[in-house]
Image: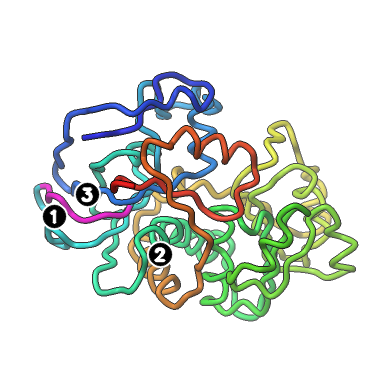
Amino acid sequence: MRAVQATAFGTPDVLQLSELPDPQPGPGEISIDVTHAAVGLIDVFVRQGLYKDVPGMPQPAFIPGLEVTGTVRALGEGVTAFRVGERVVSMSRGGTGGYAEIYLAAATSVVSIEGFDIDPALAVSVIPNAAMAHAALTAVAHLAAGERVLVHGALGGFAAAFPGIAQTQGAAEVVGSVRASKLDAARASTLPYDRIIDSAHLLAELAGEKFDVIIDAVGGEVRTASLDLLNPGGRIILAGNASEQWDHSLDSNQLWLRSITVSGFNSGAYLPTHPHLIRPALEAARAAVAAGLGDVEVEVLPLSAAAEAHRRMESREVAGRLVLSTRPH
């Protein structure tokens, strides 16, 4: 199979197209003939080596990529829920393996899109992230019907999955924030936000409004300002650090005085220890995308353009999702 490997930690130039042996599924696994693989900011961070000292994280040479869509190629022992040729989407398995023509997935992390009118590039762009958003909102944030939600970095790959899932859970209002350069794109998008605001002027634009749940995939000063935007009993879910302000911290006394909760959500750490959430989350995500609640701008590039995709992700000017296709261009 053709696959893109990170031959070392470093710049996008370490991503090289290679020929590798075809992987075979083991017990409980399926192999997928990949048509599309999502490109995410987490892929960039892993390739840069930001997590190289974290136990269990990949070491070169490895194949980046968390999520794929395609058709079932082969079934491992004990797998009965899928059939060869079925159209499927897979969530991450260890944060690697996606940028390839064949992907090995745990059957428990795969959902069928057979019979659903969902474009495969959109499916891989949204369904896995929407499943993670469902787990974060229901099991960590405990979102209740009628509550107000604020999503920072509203167009980001993960963040963009939250408004649709929040709507299905009965949120009264979902507001998104983005930096000024992305305001026009965010306001023109069909994502189900009720409003989009400039993240550089959060407190001024919201003028005393309060929220029950805040999804923060940005970090830094946006995270600090969010403390002033929560109702007592409100919850902030830390879902990323696009600002790359890795030394940022919060005053824990403010959590006590304001009676608010800050929780981290890293699906790679959380879902393996809460596996019962995965199937309902995937099915809820599929339903939301099929209902048009996850429509994002998707640009498809060839598999050979992985390095270009990473350079564009590093520029922070991508307004939608980038997807790599194994099909001829």
Amino acid of disc 2:
Ala
Q: For mark 1, what is the residue? A: 79
Residue located at (23% from left, 53% from top): 107
Camera-side mark, 2 or 3: 3
Q: Main SS of the magenta segment?
A: strand
Mark 1 burial class by Cα count in 10 Å: few <14, some 14-19, many 20+: some
Q: For mark 3, what is the residue? A: 32
Amino acid of disc 1:
Val
N-terminal of the pair, mark 2 or mark 3, is 3
Residue located at (67% from left, 75% from top): 147
N-terminal of the pair, mark 1 or mark 2, is 1
Residue located at (51% from left, 53% from top): 321
Q: For mark 2, what is the residue? A: 281
Q: Nearer the viewer, residue 237 or 121?
A: 121
* Disc 1/disc 3 C-alpha distance (Å): 13 Å
Where is residue 209 shown, x and y percent of the image? 83, 70
Mark 2 and mark 3 residues within 8 Å of each other at the beta carbon:
no
- What is the secondary structure assignment of the residue under circle 2? helix
- What is the secondary structure assignment of the residue under circle 1? loop
N-terminal of the pair, mark 1 or mark 3, is 3
Look at the image and name its color scheme.
Answer: rainbow
Q: Nearer the viewer, residue 222 or 137?
A: 222
Magenta residues (range)? 69-76
Where is residue 23 shown, x and y percent of the image? 18, 36
Find the residue positioned furthest to the left: 77
Where is residue 19 shown, x and y percent of the image? 23, 27
